[in-house]
């Protein structure tokens, strides 16, 4: 598929904070938008009533996803590690199985996901992820291992995927398209902060950026100190 001709996109996890920004950016680009969210979360999308189609249901339900992604040129998926029931990997699998061949598939996750093992994490970061994973599983609220598994499946697929790895997120007005690197640990990412609205912007922009096909960019806000200090200084950094 020619990514210049994206017309219809599906947002999986549309009612969350990131999802609502994804919907807004996609509508602003003139795309036809279909969203999937849990039935009880539908009221969170009332601001978009009449401008998008909502398919209610769990995002790991293959039948819900099959209906939602039908005819979509792009699928934007919020991979959320909630619960202890393989929700993220089930969601990723349903998208991989049912999106139409050639569709652009863009997934969200955090810096803790590594594609090639070459990311360099601080001890604090690694410890924080381990503690969150342990505590999350203990109280059966979060399953970080399953988000790792979801991304492993995406990386192994021969679809036109991009996995966008978000830094720590913050609310606030857009600062424009974040900058990225292939590896956490690159000095450009040191500030570890991105506006959530810009995380969504990067994902929507990725739909039409073929340079990001089968890439797992780690992103950071373009106006953060590390981005301002290092833009253009690393071979990993795309010219932007
Ligand atoms: N938060 C961060 O600091 C951070 C940092 C880096 C990367 N990220 C990545 O950013 C993405 C979005 O994260 P976010 O923190 O901004 O959250 P978010 O956008 O609010 O998204 C949370 C999503 O999970 C769903 N959800 C919440 N509880 C659930 C449950 N018990 N069962 C099933 N679904 C549930 C929400 O749906 P409902 O609307 O139905 O509740 C929503 O679609 C994720 O991929 C995350 O890995 C986050």
Image: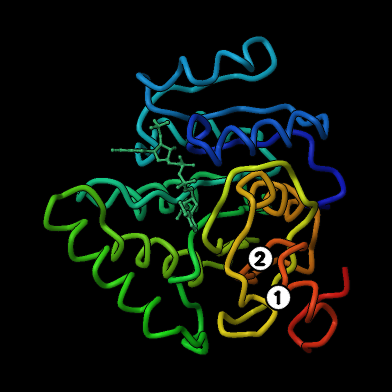
- Mark 1, residue position: 226
Q: Position of residue 239 (x, y in %)?
A: 88, 74
Q: Earlier in the sequence, mark 2 or mark 1?
A: 2
Residue, x 55% and y 41% (percent of image)? 18
Question: Which color mode does the image show?
Answer: rainbow
Residue 188 drawn above or below residue 49: below
Q: Nearer the viewer, residue 68 or 44?
A: 44
Q: Residues within 10 Å of mark 2 (few under 14, many from 20)?
A: many
Q: Nearer the viewer, residue 72 or 51?
A: 51
Frontmost of labels 2 and 1 is 1
Q: Nearer the viewer, residue 17 or 169?
A: 169
Q: Position of residue 120 (x, y in %)?
A: 50, 87
Residue, x 32% and y 71% (percent of image)? 128
- Mark 2, residue position: 220
Q: Is residue 204 left or right of residue 121?
A: right
Looking at the image, the residue that sits furthest to the top is 50
Disc marking residue 31 = none
Residue 86 drawn above or below residue 211: above
């Amino acid at each position: 598929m020619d990514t210049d001709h994206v017309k219809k996109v599906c947002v999986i996890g549309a009612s969350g904070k990131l999802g609502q920004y994804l919907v807004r950016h996609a509508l602003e680009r003139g795309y036809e938008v279909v969203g999937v969210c849990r039935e009880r979360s539908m009221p969170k999308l009332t601001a978009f009533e009449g401008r998008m189609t909502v398919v209610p249901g769990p995002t790991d339900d293959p039948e819900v996803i099959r209906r939602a992604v039908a005819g979509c040129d792009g699928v934007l998926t919020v991979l959320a590690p909630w619960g202890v029931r393989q929700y993220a990997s089930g969601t990723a699998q349903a998208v991989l199985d049912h999106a139409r061949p050639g569709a652009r598939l863009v997934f969200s996750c955090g810096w803790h996901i590594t594609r090639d093992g070459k990311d360099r994490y601080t001890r604090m970061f690694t410890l924080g992820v381990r503690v969150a994973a342990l505590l999350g599983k203990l109280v059966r609220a979060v399953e970080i291992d399953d988000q790792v598994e979801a991304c492993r499946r995406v990386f192994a697929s021969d679809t036109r995927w991009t996995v966008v790895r978000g830094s720590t997120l913050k609310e606030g007005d857009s600062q424009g398209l974040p900058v990225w690197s292939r590896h956490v640990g690159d000095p450009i990412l040191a500030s570890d902060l991105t506006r959530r609205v810009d995380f969504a912007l990067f994902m929507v922009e990725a739909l039409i950026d073929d340079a990001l096909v089968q890439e797992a960019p780690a992103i950071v806000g373009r106006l953060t100190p590390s981005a301002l200090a290092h833009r253009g200084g690393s071979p990993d950094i795309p010219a932007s």
